[in-house]
Structure formats: C-alpha cells, structure tokens
Image: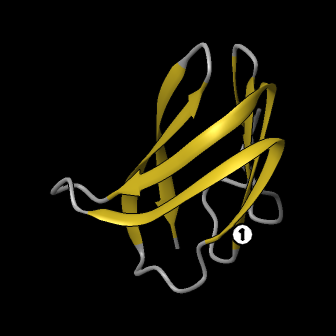
Amino acid sequence: DYVCSLCKRSLVIDDLKIYPNPSNSSLNIKSQHEIKNVKMMNATGRIVLEKNFDSTEVILDVSNLQPSIDYLNKTTKDSKHSIKIIVE
C-alpha cells in the first residue's frame, strides 16, 4: 500500500482487511472468518464503540467519534486481532 493526498490506505493482515485507514465516516472490515465482535478503544482503554456481528463483512460508522488514534479489537470464533485505527 502507499499513501497519497487523494487515496486512502487499506490494512491487510492474514485473513483480515480494514479500509480506509484513516477514516472519518465508515470503516470496512472483511475477514475470511465470521466476525463475532468488534470493539474500538481509545488510548486510555475506554471503549468508544462495540458491536456484535455474525458476518464476514462489517461496516462500522465512526463519524460520531472524536478524531483520535484508537485500537480496534476484532474477534472471530478462531482468532483475535488488535489493530491501530486513525479516526479523522
């Protein structure tokens, strides 16, 4: 991936794709495994968003979150990922 003034980056880790990052409206999450829970926490550990799902593709509305660097925790039946997300 690369960065330019007119494009947004995507993050790909193993079976997980998250885009755009940074985001100011919605965050798309795709996984080969069914996503059960998504939790976003700020730098102090406070949960700013949490949702339960039963899907391999999830769209999170982050438009009401304050600009910050948050941590997204995604849980499936078989794995758990923690990823740094930038909310603009």
Question: Picture coordinates of residue 65 (x, y %)?
Answer: 46, 79
Q: Position of residue 49 (x, y in %)?
A: 45, 66
Q: Is residue 29 above or below residue 28?
A: above
- Give the residue at x 59% y 73%: 62
Question: From the image, which quarter does the N terminus lie in?
Answer: top right
Q: Which residue is mark 1?
A: 26
Task: Give the mark count.
Answer: 1
- Kindly give the residue lying farthest to the bottom in the view shown: 64
Please, what is the three-letter code of the amino acid marked with disc 1? Ser
Viewer-closest of 64 and 34: 34
* Colouring used for the render: secondary structure
Place of residue 79 in the rendered image (x, y in percent of width and height, measured from the top left) = 56, 16
Label 1 crowd (10 A; few <14 / some 14-19 / many >=20):
some
Label 1 residue SS: strand
**Nearer to us in this view, 17 or 52:** 52
Residue at point 43%, 55% (across, down): 40
Task: Note whether 35 is above or below 40 in the view shown.
Answer: above
Looking at the image, residue 44 lies above or below residue 62: above
Residue 4: where, in percent of width, then height? 75, 54
Which residue is drawn at the image coordinates 72% and 69% (left, top)? 26
Asked if residue 73 lies left or right of residue 58, the reply is left
